[in-house]
Image (cartoon, rainbow, N blue to C red):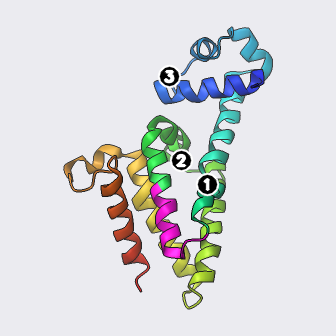
Amino acid sequence: MDSPEEKIIAATIGCIEKYGIDKTTIRQIGSEAGMNSASINYYFRSKDVLMQRVMEVIMHNAFDIENFKDSEKLPARERLVCVLDGMTAGALNFPNITKAFFSDLLTKDDPEAPIVKRFNEFIGILENELEEAYPEKKADDIRRILVQACSATFLFPGMFPNFFAVYPEIDFSDLASRKTYVESLVNRLLPD
């Protein structure tokens, strides 16, 4: 059974996705959680504290390599395709959560922001895997490849999904189209 805190966090995530982070209110969260506003304030003291905790939970879940445990045994290039495809699907399935992650970066450009740190930890895990699989490549080159791949897959399309609307051959909502895009990108960045 979920604790009251977990119930509030789940309700907040639902509200952020439904209304956007800026338009989510304590009253909406309370309604979604089946609680009153006073209960939410009792557990989290303020909306800011609640939102900070929710973003920590979301970041931990979104950038968790364990989400891709099924792909651990795949060759490095195939694993990278699987991870990027999964991250892209997640970004597109939860557009307001994705925007909530990066909204501060768009306005404050803080290199010490928690999302930057978590993203870099995630990239570091992939970097280690690729360094092992491609010992002939320099670490700087692998990091560049990963940043390019993440930017072209889940980061940019997640933040600006309508940007690709003029390219019907790149339909990120279609599994086959998205996979073709990701495979093509990875093959160009990590050629045989």
Q: Residue at x 41, y 72 (%)?
A: 186
Q: Measure how far apart labels 3 and 2 are at the Cα level.
A: 18 Å
Rendering coords of residue 77 (x, y %)? 49, 74
Q: Residue at x 52, y 60 (%)?
A: 83
Q: Measure how far apart labels 1 and 2 are at the Cα level.
A: 9 Å
Q: Which residue is mark 3?
A: 23
- Give the farthest residue toward the bottom: 136
**Residue 186 as seen in the image, left or right of residue 79:** left
Quarter in which the N terminus is drawn: top right
**Mark in the foreground, 1 or 2:** 1
Q: Secondary structure at mark 3?
A: loop
Neighbourhood count class around disc 2 (C-alpha, 10 Å): few under 14, some 14–19, many 20 upward:
some
Q: Amino acid at mark 1?
A: Val
- Vertical comparison of 35 with 65: above or below: above
Closer to the camera, 138 or 80? Answer: 80
Q: Main secondary structure of the magenta part?
A: helix
The reply to whether discs 1 and 2 touch (Cβ–Cβ < 8 Å) is yes
**Residue 97 as seen in the image, left or right of residue 173:** right
Q: Which residue is mark 1?
A: 116
